[in-house]
Image (tube, rainbow, N blue to C red):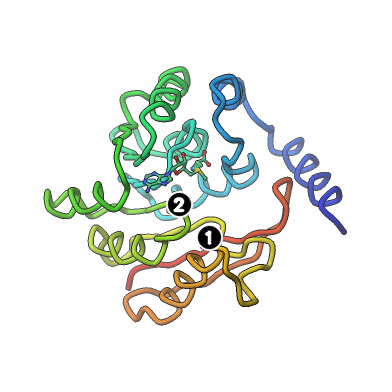
Amino acid sequence: MGDDGFAAVDAYLDGLFGGDDPALAAALEHADAAGLPAINVSPNHGRLLQVLVLACGARRVLELGTLGGYSAIWMARALPPDGRLLSLERDPRFADVARGSIAGAGLADRVEIRVGRALDTLSDLERDDAGPFDMVFIDADKEPYAEYLQAVLRVSAPGTLIVADNVVRGGAVAAASDDPAVTGVQRFNAALAAESRVAGAVIQMVGAKGHDGMALAVVR
Ligand SMILES: C[S@@+](CC[C@H](N)C(=O)[O-])C[C@H]1O[C@@H](n2cnc3c(N)ncnc32)[C@H](O)[C@@H]1O
């Protein structure tokens, strides 16, 4: 089965599970109209993130990489009324678009977007003793993924679920590469595999966005 087949199965699954609702569809439309790149998670993977928030009973979620707020909406909807999602975004314009879509989804009271380089904001969170988070979704730039893992561990606690997207990259991770995004996730995967503070696994995934994968790890 090729990319068309994977997309067809995603469409079938979206049909079964309800697909995008108006707020999620509006978030994608606003992002597109504002010229944001279409590098959000797929609806099926948004749904998976929602299941993971529920599975770990998360009340506090941290996201690295907001874009237009699409994955944030999926995850924030799974939080209890007093739950909070903090999403870190480098681009202030993207953050503004996301804030509008998150407000449109009725989640403004549950989601905060902090603008800045994620490594800087993570240092601030550590300094301010802002952790621990129950779940962390790493989905920002790929080069510093290994550094993100270390920084995220400093705002985690036993039981924290760490999810990192795009760690297979169409299979490119399995061979030598000079693409900084590939070498970034290769460093991350190796660091995760060697990290004794977590139990981790990387799963390959296919779908409307092609072949990629997610890392899942629980802090011991
Ligand atoms: C793949 S997109 C996030 C997609 C989003 N999680 C979703 O599925 O809807 C990556 C985002 O990370 C942001 N980003 C890139 N480098 C960053 C950095 N160093 N710190 C914070 N955000 C960064 C980009 O501007 C972009 O919005």
**Residue 156: image x %, image y %?**
27, 60
* Amino acid at pointer 2: Asp
* Amino acid at pointer 1: Ala
- Circles 2 and 1: CB atoms closer than 8 Å: yes
The image quarter containing residue 7 is: top right
**Element type at mark 2:** loop
> Residue drawn 51% across and 37% down?
74
Which numbered disc, 2 or 1, marks the residue that appears first in the sequence? Answer: 2
The image quarter containing residue 1 is: bottom right
State the residue position of label 2.
Answer: 141
Task: Report crowding for label 2: few under 14, some 14 to 19, many 20 or more residues within 10 A (C-alpha).
Answer: some
The image quarter containing residue 117 is: top left
Q: Is residue 210 above or below residue 220?
A: above
> Residue drawn 60% across and 47% down?
45
Q: Is mark 2 within 8 Å of ligand 1?
A: yes
Residue that protrudes farthest toward the left in the picture? 128
Mark seen at residue 100:
none
**Element type at mark 1:** helix
Q: In front here: 157 or 36?
A: 36
Q: Is mark 1 within 8 Å of ligand 1?
A: no
Q: In front here: 26 or 161?
A: 26
Q: How many marks?
A: 2
**Residue 95: image x %, image y %?**
39, 29
- Whole-angstrom CA distance, mark 2 to mark 1, is 8 Å
**Residue 101: image x %, image y %?**
47, 22
> Residue drawn 68% across and 67% down?
171
Question: Where in the image, quadrant-wise, is ligand 1 located?
Answer: top left
Mark seen at residue 181:
1
For residue 76, side relative to residue 155 (left or right):
right
